[in-house]
Image: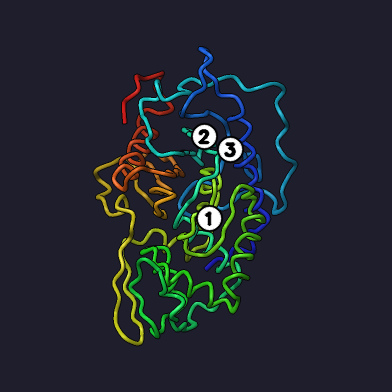
Amino acid sequence: MNSLNPIWPRVVWASCALLLSIASVSADTRPSDGHAPVDGPINAPVPVADGSAGPSGASAEMAGPAGPPAPPTEVDGPPAAPIRSSRWNTGVRVRARAALVVDMQSGEVVYQKNATSPFPVASITKLMTAVTYMGLNPDLEKQISITRQDVYRSNWTKLRFRERVSARDLLYATLVASDNAAARALARATGLTIEAFVEQMNETAASLGLANSRFTEPTGLDSGNTSTAVDCIALLWNALQDDLLAEILLAKEYRFGTNRRTHTIRTTNRLVREPVSESRWACVGSKTGYIRRAGYCLVLRAVGNDGDDLYAVILGGPTSRTRFTDMRRLLDWSVNTGRDAGPQAGVGG
C-alpha cells in the first residue's frame, strides 16, 4: 500500500494548482448581456507538477519532479467570458447550492456553480479524517474498543459499546457506511485526543493547500466543518492517491467481524450500485454527506467510456434524490455533450 507521505510535495502542488486555476478563471464570468451567471462550465486548464493536465487513469500519479515548480504566470486583464457560462445555455441546471466538474485528463473545468464559496460539507469531512489518519502511518490491524463517547449521539452506527474493531475495518465503516462512531474511534486509534486529532486534520488540510476548509470534529455532524467545491475535489483526489483508501472508496459492500458479531455494510452512494451498462461513465470513488444545515452532498470520481476522468461535487442539495439526479445529469452532460456541443437550451430543475 502506498503511503501519502512519499508523494506529499506533489500532492501539495496539485491541490494548490487546482485552487489557483479555478479561482483565476472564475474571477470574471459575466456573459455579454451584463447579468451575472448563476452556474455553468469554465473552460480552463488545470496545471499540475509538470505543467500538463491533471492525473488520469485508475492509478495515475503526478509526473515531474517531487518539488513544486513556480506558480502559473498571471494573465493580464480578466479572462474572456466562456460560452455556456450560465444556467440558461448549459443544457443542465443544478439545484444544489454549489457544484463543480473537472476533467483531470484534459485539465478542463467543465462546470461550476459557487465553486469557491464555503459551505458545510457534512460527512465529506470523513475524507479528511481518513487522509489524516493514513498520514500518521497507523497500524491497520490494531484492535480498538468502541467507547460510550464513540456511540453517544452518533445519529447512525452499527457499532456497539465494547465491540472491538480493527483499524482497517473502522476505515471501511467510516467511508463506505459513513458510520460516525467508527470515525470517532478511528481518530482515537491514533493515540491523540479528539481535539488534537482535529488540529491535525486542519494542519493536513493546510499542507494540502485546502485554504478554504475548516474542520471542527471528525464525523461531519457539526456544521462548523466547512469547505468549498474546489477543496472537496482536491481532497478526494488526494485520498485516492492512497491504495487502501482508493479501494475503500470504490467498495459497494463490505463485511467484517468484531468480538461480538459480523457486520455487513453498504455504500451510501446509490450511483455506485447502479449497473455500469446504464450510463457512459462509472463511479470509481465517492463520499456522501448529509446534515440539515449542509443539505445533501456528494463528491466522486467517474471514469467515462471514452476516457474522461471526471471529478465532481454537489454541495447543499435540497433532497437525497436531487443530489443523485443532479450528479447524474452533470456527468451525463459532461461526457455526452458538455464540451463538444455549442450553446444549448437550458432545462429546468
Is residue 12 placed above or below 312 in the rendered structure? below
Q: Amino acid at mark 2?
A: Val
Instruction: Note whether residue 216 is visible.
Output: yes
Q: Residue 116: x percent and y percent?
A: 56, 39
User: Does label 2 or label 3 sit earlier along the sequence?
Assistant: 3
Mark identifier at residue 334: none
Q: Amino acid at mark 3?
A: Val
In this view, the residue farthest toward the right is: 70
Is residue 108 placed above or below 290 in the rendered structure? above
Label 1, label 2: how many angstroms apart (C-alpha)?
Answer: 25 Å
Residue at image mark 1: 225
Q: Is residue 40 left or right of residue 192?
A: left
Q: Residue 43: x percent and y percent?
A: 53, 28
How would you rate the neighbour count of disc 2 (Cα within 10 Å): few for under 14, some for 14-19, many for 20 or more? many
Query: Which residue is rendered at x = 28% and y = 45% of the image?
Result: 321
Front in this rendered view, residue 61 or 102: 102
User: Does label 1 or label 2 sit earlier along the sequence?
Assistant: 2
Is residue 180 placed above or below 235 in the rendered structure? below
Q: Are marks 2 and 3 in contact (CB under 8 Å)?
A: yes
Residue at image mark 2: 109
Q: Are marks 1 and 3 in contact (CB under 8 Å)?
A: no
Give the label, 1 or 2, closer to the camera.
Answer: 1
Mark identifier at residue 46: 3
Q: Residue 293: x percent and y percent?
A: 43, 50
Query: Which residue is rendered at x = 51% and y = 41% of the image?
Result: 104
Q: Amino acid at mark 1?
A: Asn
Q: Is residue 263 left or right of residue 206?
A: left
